[in-house]
Image (cartoon, rainbow, N blue to C red):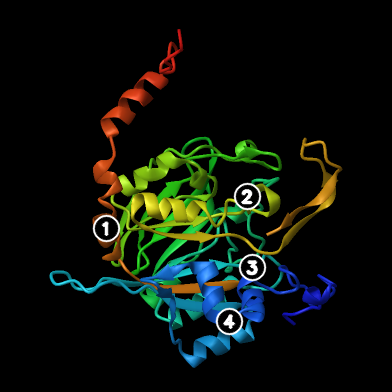
Amino acid sequence: MEKTDALNGSEGSGGGGSVCGYHSLHRLLNAISNPISSSRILYGLNRGKALETISLLKSAKSLSSGHDFDLQAYCFLINKELLREPRIVRVGLIQNSITLPTNKVKPIIDVAGASGVNVLCLQRIHLNFTRKVWTMPFAFCTREKRWCEFAEPDLARKYNMVIISPILERDVNHGETLWNTAVIIGNTGNIIGKHRKNHITRVGDFNESTYYMEGNTGHPVFETAYGKIAANICYGRHHPLNCAFGLNGAEIVFNPSATMGELSEPMWPIEPCNAAIANSYFVGSINRVGTKVFPNPFTSSDGKLEHANLGHFYGLLISDMDINLCRQIKDKWGGFQMTARYDLYTDLLTRYLKPNFEPQHNKSP
């Protein structure tokens, strides 16, 4: 099921795989190299060593196999401290393809709960599994009410788990404005708050300005039972001033996204790492998988022929992370936030927002 003859010169000849005939890059690398090398390529090193795997319950593995989704689990080790006790949080990231009538999200959440996940982030505007309907497409949105609902509070309460649920929000008090929103559900099923996507994509097929608005919630950080978390939705990862999540004290920032192919793939493994390095917090990035096909062809105003799909976009990734690592990294690098010059940035941005702004240029006489 997972392998084709791609490595023997007939790439994509069968199996429905997405990476040289394999269902994931992880499986491809394991096939052509040893697990330690593939882990280093995918996840880097932790204290000079490959990430250690987490042993999960057989029931969780059985459920993932039964529903045909991948399940991986790793942990980050840190230096032992004398004054602070470990603050280990088990985080889960879900990304899934979108098909009907299969209900994919609910079993994955069940596996996360059975595996002891504390904080779980779903993919951007995911499947509403109680209604068993399509998730919102990230292009050509038709404003149907069914995409404006979510139903995870019961599961959050059941598994004592914080859930980040990205949805399409309809604001009935303000002209039924639509927002791309991440709802933060507490481990008791309470709604802690929400964040509306700050930056709207206007790139080719991803012209989202026609169906929802730029957010107005700033860069909120949510204090949960397991740590301070934030959601930087999709296109926001391209914007460096989202360091504001770090300034507001975020320890884990989730980036639920819907991106693909040649447009964003080259940047995908780079930007989350850059954000984590620059802000000394953990970053959990999620993308969709599968191929979205539309019944009628369309063009993207890029000079290319008309087409009927948006390119190639199932599984659960679990990680144990000690939040104390955030401070350890700051101490190691001298603290990027401590050495930043916010007074200079504030002065520049204040001048930049004025109509008579002039760039600070020094010309040769």
Q: Are marks 2 and 3 in contact (CB under 8 Å)?
A: no
Name the side, left or right, on which 193 lies relative to 71.
left
Q: Nearer the viewer, residue 348 or 308?
A: 348
Up-down relation of residue 262 to residue 30 (above or below): above
Mark nearer the N terminus (2 vs 4): 4
Q: Are marks 1 and 3 in contact (CB under 8 Å)?
A: no
Give the structural element (helix, strand or loop) at label 1: helix
- CA gap between label 4 and label 3 equals 40 Å
Q: Which residue is mark 3?
A: 132
Coordinates of residue 235 in the picture (x, y in percent): 54, 45
Q: Residue at x 54, y 37 (%)?
A: 213
Q: Label 4 amino acid?
A: Asn
- Point out the image quarter for the N terminus: bottom right
Mark nearer the N terminus (4 vs 1): 4
Up-down relation of residue 341 to residue 12 (above or below): above
Q: From the viewer's perspective, is the residue at label 4 or at label 3 nearer?
A: 4
Q: From the viewer's perspective, is the residue at label 2 or at label 3 nearer?
A: 2
Q: Label 1 amino acid?
A: Lys
Q: From the viewer's perspective, is the residue at label 2 or at label 1 nearer?
A: 1
Q: From the viewer's perspective, is the residue at label 1 or at label 3 nearer?
A: 1
Q: Which residue is mark 1?
A: 332
Q: Which residue is mark 4?
A: 34
Name the side, left or right, on which 12 lies relative to 280.
right
Coordinates of residue 159 in the picture (x, y in percent): 40, 77
- CA gap between label 2 and label 4 equals 28 Å
Give the structural element (helix, strand or loop) at label 4: loop
- CA gap between label 2 and label 3 equals 30 Å
Coordinates of residue 19 in the picture (x, y in percent): 71, 68
Give the structural element (helix, strand or loop) at label 3: loop
Mark nearer the N terminus (2 vs 1): 2
Q: Which residue is mark 2?
A: 264
Coordinates of residue 345 in the picture (x, y in percent): 33, 30
